[in-house]
């Protein structure tokens, strides 16, 4: 490499080249940093995409300069499939691997992993250790999957995260695409094509048609199955007497008992049972006669088979019980019979779903009513709560309120999922009736409020804030809900529309709903003619509700640093100032929020609407709680609050303690030494804040002596080597010296 990135080349001889993506090849004569920047802008990766690096180690090492840097351990992850965790502000890509290791890559070094399409034929890797490792977080691994190693299957479904649902004979499994290779062979006629394992019963209809079309004049044992399909009880009795040892013979893969059970031929079933036909015989899909009664909606025969000793919880090849099938089909009478005979409502099928999952998904209300009155385990129930089904949520909370804050493996609780999927009615039930922890965090330290903001669910944001959600809680990156609102590109691209019948210049009319997000902002009188995107509107709303506009994340950026439009910045400041004035006058909406302080229990007494005793978080006694200022939290009784200097909920220093009759609690312990100690602590805190404001943010040693045109500053020594501001990355055009 020569001067300014130029290279002299001399042709010597032809060489054997490889295959490269054109974005990975340097263009001669251009500065490498410019090429990297262009490459970063030329890719359209999204969070959740499957990617892998196909470059040689030396090329990757060079590309990583200025884009996350190089670590020798990154070589182990070349050609390994990872999932995009997030895109950085500079366009670099943060990739997470199955062992929870994350690396930041130059986007030009990554390639999206091509997945397979529905209907394609694939083959599973034969190495069981590799498959187990790759399945972590992608459908997981069970020992019952071992028979399909090295086998070909057909892709039934492609999930949003790239995982595949693949059919192998009568079974279906979810696989990481990295476990599969493409096949060019013809599709095996035995491969299942149904998306749901419960749909394997649909093949019964075609089998019955074949049986009914066969001649009944043939004289052989398999005729028994044909007569059973026709419901000819007398002929069935004749045949079992003639061929007593052939009572369980199969025709088209089905026994006479299975076919008769499906068709509801009671007399035939009784005749076969008297001839000692086996109830537990399975077909090629693992279905027994009891499964067939569920497929055929035959409640009476279901009861008969159970009375004869049929195993109510027997699983077929898709890990489905008869209850799974009956619920999936919506056959209420069969469900009632099975549950009366102690069917296990917590068994999971190969998808990991319990019968209740299916009932909620298909809104079978009568079946939900039946299933909810059975014991529901926390490990399976927490994922069924946040569906758009208020009835199911109310029923589950009514039976097992202690499950409301149960988390899944990724840390998501029911409230997280309701917020993410815009299920406002369900979220309201969880908060008001379930009394869930409104600030509960997932594995990325995200609250339900932050998730609702990421998706632009304005109504849910209002609900959560009004019910006491902390607007200043930070996630794993130090971002608050306001950071999230201003960081998300999709929130900035969608404009907030006023309600029908109003314009952006009009005051909200009396007919405008009080819950309308637009009306709430318009009522402030600060909007004027300003058109807001959803992200900007959320930021204004959060500022009005007490969000700190100067809260710095782990990168040292406040929400205002993310706003490029000066008009929008001033508008956000105006909403924040309005909140400050309201708080000073004691009219802050935050003081009217409901604060959830008592832990969720199985009893969960409903909070009264009128002011009354609440549980103190310190002594756990029911008493009138004291209101702390300025944080507006009520978490302790007067006796416990008397000695408190900081709020135990938010760690903010308490300046006032107000009783419910609006009188002030004496903050002083009553001794002169304590007053002097409090005064000293306050002075020390103020001194530390002043010291931080005048200290250079780069060396954290010298005092600030220069201010740049962007508003940020540094000491003289650090400024000498700077061409761009280290905080906002703007080019430094002017340096203003301070004489203080």
Image: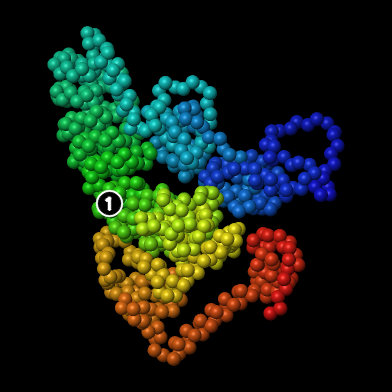
The residue positioned 27% from the left and 19% from the top of the image is 208
- Mark 1 Cα shell of 10 Å, populated few (<14), some (14-19), many (≥20): some
Number of marks in the image? 1
Q: Where in the figure is residue 690, as x and y percent of width and height?
A: 59, 77
Q: Where in the figure is residue 500, as x and y percent of width and height?
A: 41, 49
**Residue that badge 1 annotates:** 394
Colour scheme employed for the rendering of this structure: rainbow
The residue positioned 29% from the left and 58% from the top of the image is 433
Q: Is residue 466 left or right of residue 215?
A: right
Q: Residue furthest toward the bottom?
A: 672
Q: Nearer the viewer, residue 332 or 70?
A: 332
Q: Is residue 489 left or right of residue 246?
A: right
Q: Where in the figure is residue 570, as x and y percent of width and height?
A: 56, 64
Q: Is residue 230 left or right of residue 53?
A: left
Q: Nearer the viewer, residue 390 or 53?
A: 390
Whether 329 is drawn above or below 61: the answer is: above
Q: Nearer the viewer, residue 71 or 130?
A: 71
The residue positioned 36% from the left and 52% from the top of the image is 424
Element carrying mark 1: helix
Kindly tell me whether residue 646 is visible in this rendering. no
Which quarter of the image is occupied by the C terminus? Answer: bottom right
Q: Is residue 182 left or right of residue 247?
A: right
Kindly tell me whether residue 159 is visible in this rendering. yes
Residue 226 occupies quadrant: top left
The residue positioned 78% from the left and 42% from the top of the image is 28
Q: Nearer the viewer, residue 75 or 117?
A: 117
Q: Where in the figure is residue 518, as x and y percent of width and height?
A: 44, 56
């Amino acid at each position: 490499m020569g001067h300014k990135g130029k290279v002299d080349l001399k042709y010597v001889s032809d060489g054997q080249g490889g295959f490269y993506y054109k974005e990975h090849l340097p263009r001669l004569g251009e500065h490498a940093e410019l090429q990297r920047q262009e490459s970063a802008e030329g890719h359209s990766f999204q969070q959740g995409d499957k990617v892998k690096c196909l470059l040689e180690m030396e090329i990757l090492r060079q590309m990583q300069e200025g884009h996350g840097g190089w670590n020798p351990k990154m070589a182990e992850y070349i050609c390994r499939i990872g999932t995009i965790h997030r895109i950085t502000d500079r366009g670099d890509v943060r990739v997470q691997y199955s062992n929870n290791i994350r690396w930041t890559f130059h986007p030009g070094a990554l390639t999206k992993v091509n997945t397979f399409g529905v209907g394609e034929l694939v083959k599973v890797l034969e190495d069981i250790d590799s498959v187990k490792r790759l399945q972590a977080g992608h459908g997981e691994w069970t020992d019952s999957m071992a028979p399909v190693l090295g086998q070909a299957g057909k892709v039934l479904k492609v999930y949003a995260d790239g995982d595949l649902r693949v059919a192998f004979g009568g079974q279906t499994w979810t696989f990481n695409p990295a476990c599969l290779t493409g096949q060019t062979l013809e599709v095996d006629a035995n491969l299942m094509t149904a998306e749901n394992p419960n749909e394997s019963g649909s093949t019964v209809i075609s089998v019955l048609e074949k049986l009914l079309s066969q001649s009944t004049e043939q004289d052989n044992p398999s005729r028994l199955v044909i007569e059973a399909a026709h419901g000819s009880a007398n002929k069935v009795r004749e045949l079992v007497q003639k061929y007593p040892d052939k009572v369980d013979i199969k025709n088209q893969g089905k026994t006479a008992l299975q076919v008769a059970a499906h068709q509801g031929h009671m007399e035939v079933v009784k005749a076969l049972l008297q001839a000692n036909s086996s109830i537990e015989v399975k077909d090629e899909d693992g279905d027994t006669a009891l499964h067939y009664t569920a497929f055929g909606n035959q409640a009476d025969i279901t009861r008969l088979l159970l009375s004869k000793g049929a195993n109510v919880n027997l699983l077929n090849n898709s890990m489905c019980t008869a209850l799974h099938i009956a619920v999936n089909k919506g056959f209420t009478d069969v469900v009632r019979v099975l549950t009366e005979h102690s069917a296990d409502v917590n068994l999971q099928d190969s998808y990991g779903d319990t019968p209740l999952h299916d009932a909620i998904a298909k809104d079978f209300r009568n079946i939900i009513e039946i299933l909810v009155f059975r014991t529901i385990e926390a490990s399976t129930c927490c994922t069924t709560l946040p569906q758009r089904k208020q009835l199911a949520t109310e029923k589950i909370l009514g039976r097992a309120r202690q499950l409301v804050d149960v988390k899944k493996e990724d840390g998501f609780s029911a409230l997280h999922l309701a917020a993410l999927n815009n299920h406002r009615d369900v979220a309201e039930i969880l908060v008001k009736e379930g009394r869930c922890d409104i600030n509960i965090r997932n594995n990325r330290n995200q609250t339900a409020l932050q998730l609702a903001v990421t998706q632009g669910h304005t109504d849910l944001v209002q609900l959560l804030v009004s019910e006491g959600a902390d607007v200043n809680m930070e996630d794993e990156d130090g971002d608050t809900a306001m950071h999230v609102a201003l960081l998300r590109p999709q929130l900035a691209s969608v404009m907030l529309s006023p309600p029908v019948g109003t314009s952006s210049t009009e005051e909200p009319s009396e007919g405008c709903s009080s819950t309308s997000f637009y009306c709430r902002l318009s009522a402030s009188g600060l909007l004027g003619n300003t058109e807001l995107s959803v992200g900007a509107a959320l930021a204004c709303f959060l500022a009005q509700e007490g969000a700190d506009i100067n809260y710095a994340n782990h990168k040292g950026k406040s929400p205002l640093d993310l706003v490029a439009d000066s008009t929008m910045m001033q508008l956000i400041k105006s909403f924040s100032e309005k909140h400050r004035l309201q708080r000073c006058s004691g009219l802050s909406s935050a003081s009217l929020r409901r604060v959830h302080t008592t832990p969720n229990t199985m009893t969960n007494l409903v909070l009264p609407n009128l002011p009354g005793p609440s549980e103190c978080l310190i002594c756990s006694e029911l008493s009138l709680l004291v209101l702390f200022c300025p944080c507006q939290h009520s978490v302790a009784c007067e006796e416990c609050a008397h000695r408190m200097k900081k709020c135990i909920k938010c760690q903010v220093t308490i300046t006032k303690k107000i009783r419910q009759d609006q009188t002030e609690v004496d903050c002083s312990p009553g001794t002169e030494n304590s007053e002097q100690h409090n005064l000293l602590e306050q002075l020390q805190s103020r001194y530390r804040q002043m010291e931080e404001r005048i200290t250079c943010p780069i060396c954290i040693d010298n005092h600030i002596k220069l201010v740049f045109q962007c508003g940020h500053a540094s000491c003289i020594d650090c400024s000498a080597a700077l061409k761009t501001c280290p905080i906002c990355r703007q080019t430094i055009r002017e340096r203003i010296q301070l004489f203080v």
